[in-house]
Amino acid sequence: MRFTGYIGEIGQAAAAALIGGDDVVLNLASGEYGKGFGFWAARHCRELLEIEVPYDDAIDSEAVGEMLAARPDIRILSVCHHDTPSGTVNPVREIGALCRERDVLTIVDAVSSFGGMDIHPEDVNADIFVTSPSKCLGGSTGISIVHVSERAWAKIDANPAAPTASVLSLKDWRDAWRSDVLFPFTPSVSEVHALDAAVQNYLDEGPEAVWARHALTARACRAGVRALGLDLWPARDAICADTATTVRVPEGLEDEAIRREARGRYGVVFSAGRGSLMGKLVRIGHMGPVARPIYAVVAVSALGGAIAALGGKADVGAGVEAALAVIDGAG
Ligand SMILES: *Cc1c(COP(=O)(O)O)cnc(C)c1O
């Protein structure tokens, strides 16, 4: 197996702090990020168990319940909420509730959903909840946001393998923050100010309004993509993320050519697939400042225009109309 996922350094820090050498970890893999976390977890645990589903699908919480019942020695569960390269979301609320019943600690990657969807650590029983200012909050890159529950701190403090004297040490960050110990190193002052501004914008607009804006943009985009005559990547509507729309590359076309035409002709940038999904789909992001419903119309037009320019079939007029109808409340 090759390590194809990259989950960011805070995910690595979470795995190193929480997972001890005696722990059995259940990792849930429904995409490249979920799968990638398993590679970090495997470095620290005694045994790594995994539930893996095809990357156009989501984890079934019933299967998680069955696995937890069959293996009462599972101590930690890791799950990615929105597996960004797939554009799919996992039922983290249900999974979190199952874990709490059995006293299993959870690590939740909400990097590409927090701030764009209604997801918070307490609601999903997350013990470590990792997110970022640079995705849905529309802030800058360079720092991470992490929530650690009291239960998780107790486990970290009891874990002799938890790193210290390292930039990846959650303990050092906590201790520096709580005491008069000097900050571990020169802090990223500008990024901290940028995060403060991004959070202030989020609160000023109102979280509910921000989530609704992301949801409407995604709904308009999905309707537009379908009306173009294309297929969404996720197997079902219920698992489509509000913060990204993924589209299957039509037969006979190449994703790289579609992205090149969209960018060259219209200045619209789509993302590629990642790892095993490379070449199979194109991604339209709806995070932060680009999560505006009218941008769904822009994306659908550019996608349709690019495909038509390459000789593919795309009904641009129908796509635009369908996206507008959703925005107008008629779709
Ligand atoms: C972007 C992303 C990450 C990595 O975040 P970085 O800020 O690039 O470290 C991790 N998980 C998911 C689901 C992401 O979308």
Image (cartoon, helix red, strand yellow):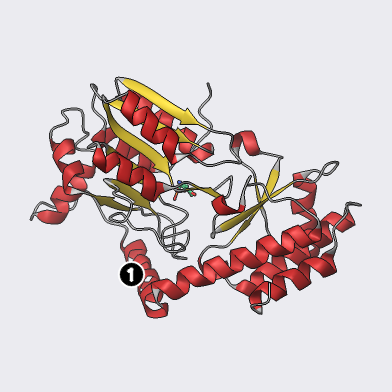
Residue 252: image location, x then y, percent:
86, 41
Which is nearer the eye, 247 or 254? 247
The residue that disc 1 covers is 196
The quarter of the rendered structure image containing the C terminus is bottom right
Picture layout, residue 198 above or below residue 175:
below
Q: Position of residue 116 (x, y in %)?
A: 46, 63
Q: Which amino acid does label 1 sit on?
A: Asp
Report the side of 10 relative to 222 (left or right).
Answer: left
Which quadrant of the structure image shows residue 133? Answer: bottom left
Q: Is residue 214 left or right of residue 121?
A: right
Label 1, ligand 1: CB separation under 8 Å: no
Q: Nearer the viewer, residue 189 or 254?
A: 254
Residue situated in front as seen by the camera: 166 or 214: 214
Residue 276 in the figure: left or right of residue 303: left
The quadrant holding residue 105 is top left
Q: In this view, does 306 lie above or below 61?
A: below
**Residue 24: image location, x then y, percent:** 29, 24
